[in-house]
Amino acid sequence: MFQKSKTVMASLAATVALTTSVMAAGHAKLEGDLVIFSDMSNPAPRAVMEGMVERFGALHPDLNIELTVIDREAYKTQIRNFLTANTPDVANWYAANRMKPYVDAGLFEDISDVWAEPELADLASTKGAMTLDGKQWGVPYTYYQWGVYYRADIYNELGLNEPATFEEMKSNCQAILDSGRKCYTIGTKFLWTAGGWFDYLNMRTNGYDYHAKLTGGEIAWTDDGVKATFANWRELIDMGAFIDNHTAYSWQESLPFIVSGDAAAILKGNFAVPPLREAGLDDSKLDFYQFPAITDGVALAEDAPTDTFHIPSGAKNKDAAKAFLKFVVSAENQTLINNGDNLGQLPVNAKSSVDDDKFLKEGFEMLSSNSPGGVAQFFDRDAPAEMAKVAMEGFQEFMVKPDNLDKILARLDRAAKRIYK
Amino acid sequence: MSSSTKAATQSSWYKRNEIAVTPWLFLLPGVAMFLLYVIFPIFQSINVSFYEWDGLGEAEWVGLGNYEELYWDDAFYVSLRNNLIWLVLYLLAIPAGLFIALFLNQTVSGIRLYKSLFFFPFVISQVVVGLVFTWFYDPTFGLLNQFLGVFGINPINVLGDERYVTYGIIAAGIWPQTAYCMILYLTGLNAVDPEQIEAARLDGAKGWRMLWHIIIPQLKPATFIAFVVTIIGALRSFDLISIMTNGGPFGESRVLSFYMFEVALSEYGFRMGYGASIAVVLFLIMLCFIAYFLYSMYQDDKGGR
């Protein structure tokens, strides 16, 4: 008996020595179960998630990690069930207002203490997006730029340059239309793609602060600034810049138009690049430009949605969960999971390196040096969920029936009065 | 001694009432489940519809506020209108099912195979039906528009145009529903009395007159069931809308059940109270039909005795 416990002690000491030598000293030993629910269900993100679990598990061999990957769209409706009933220890979600309902309901754990630790100082750029009521409610693991991805070969053929102003954007578009193509492909079946266009048009027409006030409910939807944004949008619509029948397509279904050359560009996040590359558009055919300025003197601002990890307040193994969150944001892990072979997005840790990829480098450059106005999350993450839904439906209707604008804005205004009361 | 007498009277009470009590004992588990999972939630929803509640935090009493908002809500009327279109057009599945059943009610070799092929759309999932029709309607690559293109007709964006979208989805829904009605009528046709047909034939009835005066009256039970399942199917048309359009374009293909899901349970929906009030309205509409069905079943029962 005594003998036995001695050997156990010895082996324990050995493991401790082993693990501490593997990882940076100072980590507590983690035991028990760690249940992770993830929405990273697309092939590449799924591999990343599984890889992270594997590497974290290797650091903590006594920890039993259970990973459940849920379809990304289904996850959005399931989260409220599992946060209240069958709580995991770690869960994926999104930054900014999108996490507000769960923060308000007390379902996400306040992890300001984790953010106070020195390792997280390198995440300062995303701290604002994770902060509500002066506290932090999760950690980011990736973000990505939005912008116009265009067919460089078509632009070359027509002798066009990347536009810097709205006038150039329109004249380019006219040339593209004259050549028998559409300027932009878009699939608005799931509404949010139209939210991207509104974000950019509004931030370029009225500026970031105005946009933030609008999504925050401080400016009425019937305001003249909003109307100016829609007037600019209408110019593009009246030109016939967007593909026909976009209401019938999801964003994935809208990609074949740019691949076939029937449309010359798409306004999208960087996640559009892998499928476009897979479809045969190499870097000589596909290029990127920042959405051009519209109103003179309005500082350029960008959309850069941040995806996150949170600890539900009902989590059972919070120590392990916090350790996992710290592992996720560590510089080394960030460099690895965001490189071109994995997520192909931007790392959130300032000490990480951005992968040597044309679009990632250009996007990182744009966000860090050419976005003086500010960085927004995305329309449906900046505005409250209900408002986002009503508004994006309005955007879709506007893109099909621009004459209904006054009716749409009145409807949005009525909804806003109820939602932001 | 006294305790045994008591036991004897107890058992004799059961013995005396055995005939009356036993059916209720057998019914008890079912009734309890029905009360717990059907009747109780109805009252629960009615209760929730008087609150403003995001499903997570505290509920706030708003009285009839949700119903007042429904009254001003354009989207609600669009859904209601679509529900009515569904109810009316979905009934086409009944005559369609009847005619396919009549057509298949013959004895040629391989008829079982044809019957199963016609029944096939009902067996496959509604999700698959929705996907198939979505591809069929695709404005650029879809079979429908390729076909129309042969005749020089410009592509029609069925699912992206607010004028056609509801009809497009109903057409997809009628496909499996017709198969369902067909199977009901096929079993009904087996029970048609051959002597009556013989008699009618001797009296010179054939074709439409035979169908209308001899066959269809005998199919009345099948028609009743087909009517019931079709009405219920029309009112709970949810999966096809969710798969094919997600309620779009700009909410023009929503029906009440989908709108309820959207405001209460979907990605952006956090309004349990408002969703519940839509559910109550939908329940009241269904209640009309349920009352009618129960009444006619009760009449049949009385007539049968």
Image (cartoon, grey):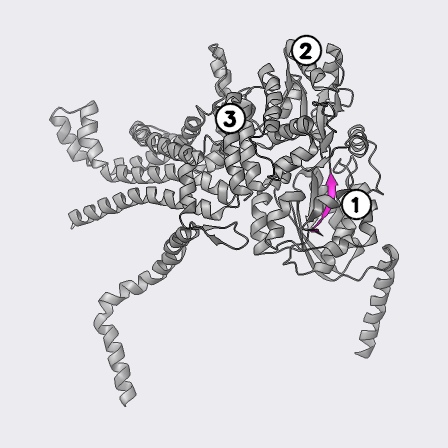
In terms of secondary structure, where does tag 2 sit? helix
Q: Residue at x 62, y 41 (%)?
A: A72
Q: In the rendered view, would you say B211 is above or below A48? A: above
Graded by Cα atoms within 10 Å as few (under 14), some (14 to 19) or many (20 or more), the crowding at tag 1 reads few
Q: Give percent across and percent down for residue B121.
A: 43, 33
Give me the disc on residue A406: 3
Tell me the amino acid under the disc marked 2: Ala
The disc, 1 or 2, on the residue closer to the chain's N-terminal end is: 1
In terms of secondary structure, where does tag 3 sit? helix
Q: Which residue is mark 2?
A: A175
Is A154 covered by the magenta stretch? no
A358 relative position to B34: left or right: right
Q: Give percent across and percent down for residue A363.
A: 77, 31
**Magenta-tinted stretch:** A134-143
Front label number (2 vs 3)? 3
Determine contact: label 2, label 3, CB under 8 Å.
no
Is A136 covered by the magenta stretch? yes
Query: As rendered, which of B219 and A314 lies closer to the eye?
Result: A314
Image-quadrant location for residue A18: bottom right
Q: Which residue is mark 1?
A: A124
Residue A399 at least partly seen: yes
Q: Residue at x 46, y 30 (%)?
A: B252
Q: Chain of mark 3?
A: A
